[in-house]
Image (spheres, grey):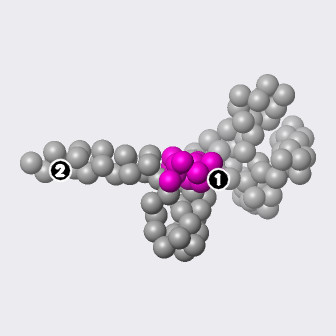
Amino acid sequence: HSWNEKFNQLCAYKAQTGHCNVNRHDEKNKTLALWVMQQRLSYKKNTLSSDRLQQLNSIGFIWDPIEHSWNEKFNQLCAYKAQNGHCNVTQNDEQNKPLGSWVKHQRKLYKKNAVSSNHIQQ
């Protein structure tokens, strides 16, 4: 009963915002955010029933928001490359600033991992 109530709240939240990623810092939706986190945890532990899994999937529930966010940025980068012929996204342009910051961060992570891997091999 309680699960269905929260699911219905999540459906209403999605109708209002266009997504199911309830921010845990949103005081107005704090209990819903905790419920969403619990569903993700149950999914990871493989303790979420198939019915509930199916219900959440039917509304576009994102199981791993970090991976989802990364994939969205990657797709934006692919579109940028298709349009511009390169991946050198400037951060000086307000329109591309978030994507440019993401690309810069990915490069920093790549360099850090390459240095770590190189250090381990020596």
Q: To which quarter of the image does residue 1 belong? A: top right
In the image, residue 97 lies in the stretch drawn in magenta: yes
At numbered mark 2, what does the secondary structure look like: helix, strand or loop?
A: helix
Q: Decide: few, some or many residues near mark 1? Use Cα within 10 Å; few <14, some 14-19, many ≥20.
A: few
> In front: 52, or 66?
66
Stretch in magenta: 90-102
> In front: 82, or 66?
82
Circle 2: residue type: Asn
Q: CA distance from mark 2 to mark 1?
A: 36 Å
Give the residue number, with chain letter if any, for mark 2. Answer: 118
Residue 103 position in % (x across, y down): 47, 53
Vertical comparison of 31 with 20: above or below:
above
Counting residues from the start of the chain, the first of labels 2 and 1 encountered is 1
Give the residue number, with chain letter if any, for mark 1. Answer: 95
Q: To which quarter of the image does residue 9 belong? A: top right
Residue shown at 50% from the left, 53% from the top: 90
